[in-house]
Amino acid sequence: MMLALWLLLQALTLLGVVNYLRHLPADRQEEAPAGAVMILSVRDDWDGGAELIARLKAQSAGFRLLLATSGACAAAESLGARERDWVEIVRAGIATDEGQKVHKIRAALRALRPDDRYLLFIDADIEPPARLVGRLLFPLARGKADIVTGYRLLLPAPGWMSTLVGAVELQLATMPRAASSTMPWGGAMAMTRAVADQLDLDAVLAGRLSDDMAIGLAGWRAKLRLRPVRDLLIANPLDGTVPSLWAFGVRQYRHVLTNSPGMWLAATVGVMLQSAAWVWALGWGGWPAIAIGYGAAWGRAALRSRILDKVLEPQQACCARRSLLWDMAAPFVPLWAHLMVQVQAALSHRIRWGGWDYWVKRGRVLRMERVGA
């Protein structure tokens, strides 16, 4: 009986990746409507993002860039002076009761012009493909969605911890995505100006720490059409020390927990069941259970490798494949690490992010202190 349930579980996880691969769009249609504006929030120590800016200039669809800063980013000021024709600097100052990123985005929203019809949001640490803007705008311009989103795909540096975090994130990135359960990712997200006005986006973000969680939950409540663009798995380089990488994982789930405890619970229960099933397979299932588990893991790795080839540039795909080694050698380790991160996230409501400590409840910032102050 247990072996049959184990076989069913592994078959379902394998079919989930098959589903993602099968639903990758082949045509990848783009739109380039007038009135697109991109909001990019950067920290004071931002180095100017030479590669990011080059990739934004190479986009197949045009847009205006709103670069949101606290007012103390020298690289942003320099970029704005050089690129006056398409870059505008928004100086938000320092937040006192909300996330610094949210504070900058709200300042950018107040700087919109009457003819800005489409709002795009990206993160400063991504490596976007040339189709990013056009693909995000396509469902909006065709009236097929109200909010559209890509998703992060980590490119781990060499090292066991970086590739382990990448393995966990790759599992999440290649899960089947239904429009009714999509949560947007602030690293590559877009909506129409009309939807932003309908939501009263400035009010939705006020006092919040997480921009994408706040927008996603508001979209769900308003019964908006949230649509994932499945081929937009956006390369996001990952490096750091073991403690910093572990803290990154805990922070992601603390964002989830402090905004939606139900979502955190559903995700944790799912990972807990899979983790416990692997404990049974390794301890009591015998060689048949281990063979089934590894067979399914190698199958998922092969499918994910094909997905990487379809959505990433060759060099990016090569980096991302480092994470697949965990699927092939010890597929239970990313699950157990994932569960430990989820549990640790529940032990505190304090989130350290971008040089600040935030205490958060129900998505709202209760208190914030600069780290080391």
Image: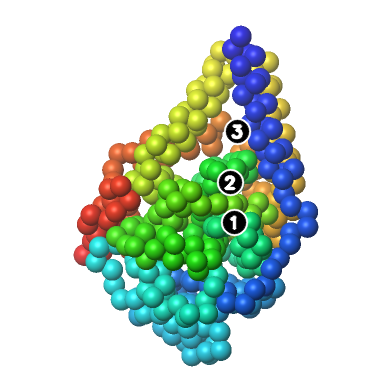
Question: Which numbered mark, 1 or 3, is in the foreground of this view?
Answer: 1
Give me the disc on residue 331.
3
Disc 1 marks which amino acid? Ala
- The answer to whether marks 2 and 1 mark residues whose Cβ atoms lie closer than 8 Å is yes
Residue 252 image offset from top left, x and y in percent: 43, 49
| Front one among 302 and 177 | 177
The vertical placement of 91 against 8, above or below, is: below
Residue 107 image offset from top left, x and y in percent: 37, 74
Residue 312 image offset from top left, x and y in percent: 69, 57
Find the distance from the CA under tag 2 to the CA under tag 3. 28 Å
Residue for badge 2: 179
Q: Residues within 10 Å of mark 1 (few under 14, many from 20)?
A: many
Disc 3 marks which amino acid? Pro
Of all residues shown, which one is farthest toward the right?
27
The answer to whether 156 appears left or right of 255 in the picture is right
Q: Quadrant of residue 278?
A: top right
Q: Quadrant of the N terminus?
A: top right
Find the distance from the CA under tag 2 to the CA under tag 1. 9 Å
Describe the element under mark 1 as helix, strand or loop.
Answer: loop
Which badge, 2 or 3, comes first in the chain's sequence? Answer: 2
The answer to whether 33 appears left or right of 196 in the picture is right
Q: Residues within 10 Å of mark 2 (few under 14, many from 20)?
A: some
- The answer to whether marks 2 and 3 mark residues whose Cβ atoms lie closer than 8 Å is no
Describe the element under mark 2 as helix, strand or loop.
Answer: helix
| Front one among 97 and 77 | 97
Which badge, 2 or 1, comes first in the chain's sequence? Answer: 1
Disc 2 marks which amino acid? Ala
Question: Which numbered mark, 2 or 1, is in the foreground of this view?
Answer: 1
At horizontal 34% and vertical 68% (from top left) the residue drawn is 103
The vertical placement of 334 against 38, above or below, is: above
Residue for badge 1: 145
Q: Residues within 10 Å of mark 3 (few under 14, many from 20)?
A: many
